[in-house]
Amino acid sequence: MNNATVLVVDDEPQLRRAMRATLTDLGYSVIEAKTGEEALAMLRRESADLILLDLNMPGIGGLETCRAIRESSDLPIIVLSVRNTERDKVEALDAGADDYVTKPYGIQELLARIRAAIRRMPASADSLPETFSSDDLQIDFATRRATVAGKSIRLTPKEYDLLRFLVSHPDKPIPHRKLLQTVWGPDYGDEVEYLRVTINQLRKKIETEPSKPKYLLTEPWVGYRFATKHQPE
């Protein structure tokens, strides 16, 4: 894992220097960008395994940069910001971020988040499904392709991991903490807004009526359930 390349996007040179020193000491390769525009240009010519993205930058800013990256890339994105309200976190997650770390942060916490973001959800062929099919929804987990009412859709890595885990436990309520620790990592458990945002994005993609979901159901005070047994309308 420590031979991964991390793109650090921040307009503060001292932060980039500190991050480079810390990450390279641990075996990571580091590339840098001062602005969102520079980051997007760099990603077109260089490869990275993870992006550390500051929100408060000149130019297009962190949120727009995140959205632009998500249009063509599934790279894990960890947003770094001094803002710590739930609304700020939800906006970043809506823009496509995988995680949100508030400044100032402990370096060990950030390193744990980096490891969790690079490490994908463990997949066991014995326990996780390869496909799901119904009258209006087809999912091929092996190729990460989904079709809704004949229209092809694209899932982000976290959407894919969350959906596959829910489908692997059909019609069973899965608690928030279990979902978070399985999909995001063992250090997670209280970040319920991460689930709420990702479920909402999934509903927009796979439900014919996102406001009246028939697959991704909320279990009040518990978690979420993927329903395969639907009541007649």
Image (cartoon, grey):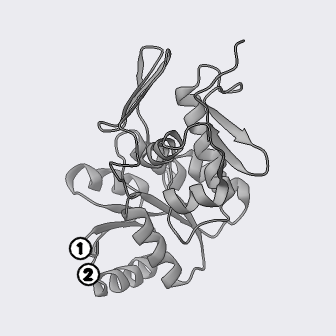
x and y percent of residue 216 in the render? 62, 35
Residue that appears at 44% across and 67% down:
116
x and y percent of residue 65 in the render? 46, 50
**Can see residue 54?**
no
Say what secondary structure mark 1 lies in. loop
Say what secondary structure mark 2 lies in. loop
- Check disc 1 and report the residue beneath it: 3
Amino acid carrying mark 2 in the image:
Gly
Q: Nearer the viewer, residue 217 or 32?
A: 217
Q: Nearer the viewer, residue 23 or 163?
A: 163
Mark 1, other Cα within 10 Å: few <14 / some 14–19 / many ≥20: few
Q: Cβ–Cβ below 8 Å for labels 2 and 1? A: yes
Residue 20, which numbered label? Answer: none
- Check disc 2 and report the residue beneath it: 27
Which residue sits furthest right?
Answer: 221
Quarter of the picture containing the C terminus is top right
Residue that appears at 21% across and 57% down:
46
x and y percent of residue 140 in the render? 35, 32
| Left or right position of 76 against 48 | right
Image height of 186 relative to 177, above or below: below
